[in-house]
Image (spheres, rainbow, N blue to C red):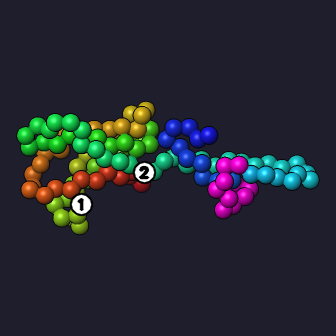
């Protein structure tokens, strides 16, 4: 079972096998190494009531990861807004000023 914020990514000695359970017919000593990778998905939410001209954005991603927030008026041209470290539960929050009638927000894991 992967720890919170991590996912099973396969077996080093069995490339391409993503099954968490494997059956082996052993005829010699065998070493199997389980590989785990950080969860890479991020979800955004706008919780509760908002203040005039400001929207609070909550991101949920990998625990303790650095999260970058970007804004756009057209979903083509994106501008950095802010970066924040997620807490141990993978959550981070920002207060984003609404500067356009249509504004789009996205979060990512910086490289």
Secondary structure that dominates the magenta span? loop
Determine which residue is flagged by label 1: 78
Left or right position of 64 against 68:
right
- The residue depicted at 91 percent of the width and 51 percent of the height is 28
| Residue range corresponding to the magenta coloring | 12-21
Is residue 110 found inside the magenta-colored segment of the image?
no
Instruction: Name the N-terminal-most of marks 1 and 2.
Output: 2
SS at badge 2: loop
SS at badge 1: loop
Residue extending farthest to the bottom is 76
Q: Which mark is residue 22?
A: none
At label 2, counting other C-alpha atoms closer than 10 Å, the crowd grade (few under 14, some 14-19, many 20 or more) is few
Q: Quick check: marks 1 and 2 in contact, CB under 8 Å?
A: no
- The residue depicted at 21 percent of the width and 36 percent of the height is 48
Tell me, yes or no, if residue 80 can be seen here. no
- The residue depicted at 75 percent of the width and 49 percent of the height is 32
Image x and y of residue 18, in percent:
64, 56
At label 1, counting other C-alpha atoms closer than 10 Å, the crowd grade (few under 14, some 14-19, many 20 or more) is some
Left or right position of 70 against 86:
left
Nearer to us of marks 1 and 2 is: 2
Find the distance from the CA under tag 1 to the CA under tag 2: 19 Å
Determine which residue is flagged by label 2: 41
- The residue depicted at 49 percent of the width and 41 percent of the height is 5
Residue extending farthest to the right is 27
Quadrant for the N terminus, please: top right
Q: Nearer the viewer, residue 75 or 67?
A: 75
Residue 62, quarter of picture: top left
Image x and y of residue 13, in percent:
74, 56
Residue 52, quarter of picture: top left
Is residue 19 found inside the magenta-colored segment of the image?
yes
């Amino acid at each position: 079972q992967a720890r919170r914020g991590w996912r099973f990514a396969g077996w080093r000695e069995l490339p391409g096998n993503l099954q968490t359970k494997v059956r082996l017919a052993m005829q010699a000593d065998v070493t199997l190494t389980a590989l785990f990778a950080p969860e890479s998905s991020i979800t955004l939410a706008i919780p509760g009531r908002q203040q005039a001209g400001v929207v609070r954005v909550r991101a949920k991603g990998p625990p303790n990861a650095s999260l970058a927030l970007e804004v756009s008026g057209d979903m083509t041209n994106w501008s950095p807004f802010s970066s924040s470290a997620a807490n141990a539960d993978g959550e981070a929050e920002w207060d984003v000023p609404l500067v356009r009638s249509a504004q789009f927000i996205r979060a990512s894991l910086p490289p």
